[in-house]
């Protein structure tokens, strides 16, 4: 026959083993939630970074389009003008149209007009747009 002390001993082991198992499982839900919050936060930070890059690229495209318009507008004025020499410019300030903007117009002896528009945003490199056209009959 099995003695009472052996039964009590086996019961104690089971209870102690169950208690030990539950102690090792404590905090898993908290750890999983913290990892989920970390992954979610990284995703939000990535979206914020993407948004800032998109805003910067949009403003760069706006300034490039504006520089193109300014240069083409100057070429249009030269086409309808009377004398090419009246339109020669060197670093004319156009800061009201582009940040730190300047416009230059050069005319070669064979009547090729080159319009160069430059601008620079604070803390960035200088950007330049240049276009040219042959003007005949003016």
Image (cartoon, grey):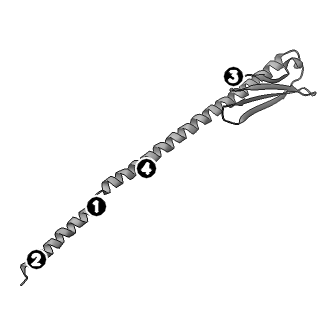
Alpha carbon distance from label 1 to label 3: 66 Å
Alpha carbon distance from label 2 to label 3: 93 Å
Question: Which residue in the structure is indicated by mark 3?
Answer: 97
Q: Residues within 10 Å of mark 4 (few under 14, many from 20)?
A: few
Question: Which residue in the structure is indicated by mark 2?
Answer: 7
Nearer to us: label 1 or label 3: 1
Nearer to us: label 4 or label 1: 1
In front here: 123 or 106? Answer: 123
- Compared to 53, does 113 lie above or below? above
- Who comes first in sequence, dot 1 or dot 3? 1
Question: Which residue in the structure is indicated by mark 1?
Answer: 25
Alpha carbon distance from label 1 to label 2: 28 Å
Q: Residues within 10 Å of mark 2 (few under 14, many from 20)?
A: few
Disc 1 to disc 2: CB gap under 8 Å: no
- Who comes first in sequence, dot 1 or dot 2? 2
**Helix or strand or loop: what does disc 1 sit on?**
helix
Question: Which residue in the structure is indicated by mark 4?
Answer: 39
**Helix or strand or loop: what does disc 4 sit on?**
helix
- Residue drawn at (20%, 67%), measured in percent from left and top? 18
Q: Residues within 10 Å of mark 1 (few under 14, many from 20)?
A: few
Q: Residues within 10 Å of mark 3 (few under 14, many from 20)?
A: some
């Amino acid at each position: 026959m099995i003695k009472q002390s052996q039964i009590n001993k086996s019961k104690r082991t089971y209870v102690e083993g169950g208690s030990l198992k539950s102690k090792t499982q404590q905090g898993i839900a908290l750890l999983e939630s913290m990892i989920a919050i970390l992954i979610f936060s990284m995703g939000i930070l990535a979206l914020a970074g993407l948004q800032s890059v998109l805003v910067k690229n949009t403003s760069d495209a706006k300034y490039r389009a504006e520089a193109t318009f300014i240069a083409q507008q100057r070429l249009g004025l030269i086409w309808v003008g009377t004398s090419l020499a009246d339109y020669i410019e060197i670093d004319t300030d156009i800061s009201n149209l582009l940040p730190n903007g300047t416009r230059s117009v050069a005319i070669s002896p064979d009547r090729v007009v080159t319009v160069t528009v430059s601008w620079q945003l604070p803390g960035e490199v200088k950007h330049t747009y240049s276009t040219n056209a042959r003007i005949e009959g003016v």
